[in-house]
Amino acid sequence: MPTTVNNPSIEDLETARTTFERIEPRHVFYRAATELIRLASTPGAISLSVAEAVAVLLQTWNRAFYRYRPFNEQHFRDIEDLVRRHSEVLASFKECSIDTLTGEDQQTVTALFKDFEIVLGPVGAAKSLHLLAPRFFPLWDRAIAKAYGLPLGSCGTNPSRYVRFMEITKEQIRIVGGEQAVGRNPLKAIDEYNYCRYTRRSM
């Protein structure tokens, strides 16, 4: 594990949660995002499709990516195509937790992340995959990836970095005692810690 990355304690995660809610008013969008995806995944619950839910939320969560890129009909169709083509594998990961990650998953995750990254960039890919399988796929951004010794490269070159990030995150969660010790989704807790420590440098 890169020496620049610390293994957070339960106390660190609790501090990060308080700090995150104080410095990041957009935290409410995470709750809205997970609920919207849940409803969109339930037949008849709402009229939005899963792809539409992801597309709407990306415009809030991943605004920097769209600063110089149009969010047009073609881009939306590309998101729909991603979700449709990978629906079976996404469904297989939906109820999984990251502690089930094995070497056998590496090829599947690599191919999945590569396809999402080509359409959404490396940060948007992680955010979308996390929404679709929130206990299996961790979140990151460029500052976090760099802090973990995995600086993001050009689009399409980052799947192996993401797989390595998953392995590191899995180990961090094991060390801290797993979801039972954390008391909530540990991937969200780790992301809040990473965001406060490496993105915002508020810890």
Image: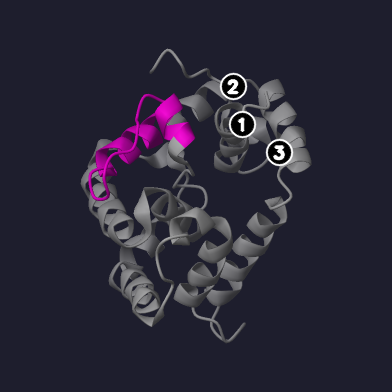
Q: Amino acid at mark 1?
A: Tyr
Which tag, 1 or 2, sits closer to the chain's start? 2
Q: Secondary structure at mark 1?
A: helix
Tell which circle, 1 or 3, labels the residue nearer the N-terminal end.
Answer: 3
* Within-10-Å neighbours for mark 2: few <14, some 14–19, many 20+: some
Q: Quadrant of residue 17?
A: top right
Disc 2: which residue: 8
Q: Which residues are magenta?
A: 143-168
Instruction: Using the image, tell me which numbered label, if any, was put on residue 20.
Output: 3
- In the rendered structure, which amino acid carries the disc numbered 3? Phe
- Earlier in the chain: of badge 3 and badge 2, it is 2
Q: Is residue 89 left or right of residue 201?
A: left
The image quadrant where one finds the N terminus is top left
Is disc 3 in contact with disc 2, using a CB cutoff of under 8 Å? no
Q: Circle 2 — which element?
A: loop
Residue 147 percent coordinates (x, y): 45, 25
x, y percent for residue 148: 42, 26
Q: CA distance from mark 1 to mark 2?
A: 8 Å
* Mark 1 and mark 2 residues within 8 Å of each other at the beta carbon: yes
Q: Quadrant of residue 92?
A: bottom left
Let me know if residue 155 is in the magenta part.
yes
Picture quadrant of residue 57: bottom right
Residue drawn at x 62%, y 33% is 200
How far, Cα to Cα, is label 1 from label 3? 8 Å
Instruction: Identify the residue under disc 1.
Output: 193
**Nearest to the observer: residue 123 or residue 51:** 123
Marks 1 and 2: which is nearer the front? Answer: 1
- Secondary structure category for the residue under label 3: helix
Nearer to the camera, 106 or 190: 190
